[in-house]
Image: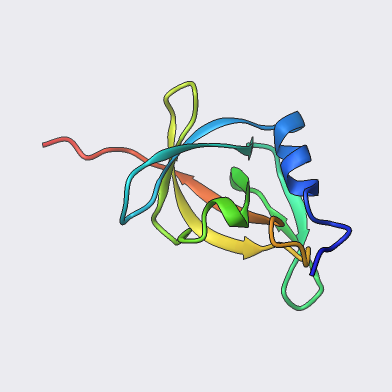
Amino acid sequence: MVSIFDGMAGILSDVLGGEIHYFPQDGAGREIRSIFRETPIEIEGADGQLVRIEAPTWRVRRDLVPELARDDRITLEDGRTFRVMVVHHGGSPASDGFMICELASFAARTV
């Protein structure tokens, strides 16, 4: 079934987003046009309450990352790497709706 919301996430990503390299735990990394933010945001939680996220966030279309999970990584164009801590599923019924990830800075271990 086609929804009025289908395609909106793609338009927003194209306008507001940038190329982010996504590294799932299993599988090959790939570049995805999506939105990274370091400023706090508010989203609607699963219970309908507003949730304020102070951590950096990554907003990505769910159809582009069906395997998205905690501990996956993203790398920005400037070389900084972040680890996915929490995945919030957006409220849009569209198949290409957004997922919002809370991120933590990723520091590679040195031996």
Outermost left residue: 111
Residue, x 77% and y 49% (percent of image)?
A: 7
Residue, x 77% and y 39% (percent of image)?
A: 12
Viewer-nearest residue: 77 or 50: 77
Residue, x 60% and y 45% (percent of image)?
A: 58
Instruction: Give the total of numbered labels.
Output: 0
Residue, x 48% and y 21% (percent of image)?
A: 78
Viewer-nearest residue: 90 or 63: 63
Q: Position of residue 31 (x, y in %)?
A: 48, 35
Answer above or below: position of 67 versus 56: below
Residue 66 appears left or right of 71: right
Outermost right residue: 4
Q: Quadrant of the N terminus?
A: bottom right
Residue 73 appears left or right of 49: left
Residue 76 appears left or right of 71: right
Answer above or below: position of 20 versus 7: above
Outermost bottom residue: 47
Q: Quadrant of the C terminus?
A: top left
Q: Is the image coloured rainbow, by chain, by secondary structure, or in one colour?
A: rainbow
Quadrant in the rendering for residue 26: bottom left
Q: Position of residue 4 (x, y in %)?
A: 89, 58
Q: Position of residue 80 (x, y in %)?
A: 44, 29
Q: Position of residue 48 (x, y in %)?
A: 81, 74
Outermost top residue: 78
